[in-house]
Amino acid sequence: MHTRQEQLEAFGRLLDVLDELRVKCPWDRKQTNESLRPNTIEEVYELCDALMRNDEKNICKELGDVLLHVLFYAKIGSETGAFDIKEVCDRLCDKLIFRHPHVFGEVKADTAEKVSENWEQIKLKEKDGNKTVLSGVPAALPSLIKAYRIQDKARNVGFDWEEREQVWTKVKEEVGEFEAEVAHMDKEQAEAEFGDVLFSLVNAARLYKINPDNALERTNQKFIRRFNYLEEHTLREGRNLKDMTLEEMDALWNEAKSKGL
């Protein structure tokens, strides 16, 4: 691993390269917060993909791409006089110190749960922090992750089931309400109730310490593997999926399943 001095020198070099780009590249000079935003989202997802695969080579690469965007936004901020990368770093350090009084102060927190509870309470006390418990949940988060974060933040202030097994009564209640609306053929209400079903299942996952986003992605990948097996087998026989019966497809699906796909 590199020394702290080498790491600081590399960071300085990156800043110099970015300065040069902003000066000499017309396209980069025209970039704004708004124009960069879609690319930033894409880069973060690409980093998440690499993390999910535990692909260390690409994790390093994608971290660099995300870091470039952080520096780009800071550079734009410095050009407008709003802030620069030093202020970004200073505010982050101040926030970390303020939010970890059990490390940098005298507060006692012996468990991860206690640290998390303190974290949420501290954020409400910050000068520029969250005004309400749920205001810290980004509006742009994907719905499944947002549901988890909403519930987790509510838990940190004591709004949670006394016993995790109690959540199953709520899940069954929501499923029953969804089934009733489906029977009435009320699409709008059925959609609302289905959302309640999903929200209650996310709650169950949280209580049993399962990441619902990871769980769903595992099922996505499993479906892809088995469906690809089905499709490849069909193509080898010179057939088209549309010409196969459901029974034939189910047989191949179960074959893929038996192979551990």
Image (cartoon, grey):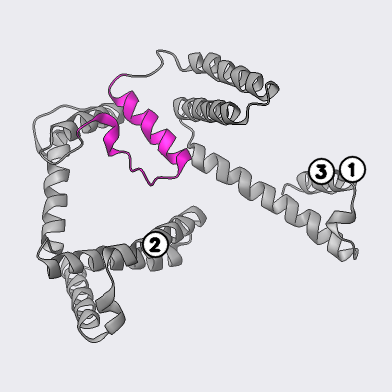
**Residue 127, percent from left and from top:** 10, 38
Q: What secondary structure is the magenta-colored segment mainly? A: helix
Q: Secondary structure at mark 2?
A: helix
Horizontally, residue 170 falls left or right of residue 30, namely right
Circle 3 or circle 2, nearest the eye: 2
Question: Residue at coordinates 62% horizontally, 43% vertically from top-left?
Answer: 219
Left or right relative to 29: residue 169: right
Q: Secondary structure at mark 3?
A: helix
Q: CA distance from mark 3 to mark 1?
A: 11 Å
Disc 2 marks which residue? 38
* Of pointers 3 and 1, the one earlier in the residue sequence: 1
Q: Label 3 is placed on what type of residue? A: Asn
Residue depicted at x 28% and y 72%: 31
The earlier-in-sequence mark between 3 and 2 is: 2
Nearest to the observer: residue 248 or residue 8: 248
Badge 3: few (under 14), some or many (20 or more) residues near its Cα, within 10 Å? Answer: some
Answer above or below: position of 101 versus 10: above
Residue drawn at point x = 35 percent, y = 67 percent = 65
Q: Quadrant of the N terminus?
A: bottom left
Specify the amino acid type for callout 1. Answer: Glu
Q: Which residue in the structure is indicated by mark 1? A: 247
Disc 3 versus disc 1: nearer the observer: 1
In this rendering, the answer to whether 25 lies above or below 125 is below
Q: Quadrant of residue 5?
A: bottom left
Q: Which residues are magenta?
A: 131-158
Residue 48 position in % (x across, y down): 44, 55
Query: What residue did someone put label 3 on?
Result: 254
Residue 150 horizontal/vertical position (percent): 37, 32
Looking at the image, which residue is at 27% across and 76% down? Answer: 30
Measure how far apart labels 2 and 1 are at the Cα level. 43 Å
Would you call the spot at circle 1 few (<14 residues within 10 Å), some (14-19), or many (20 or more)? Answer: few
Disc on res. 88 = none
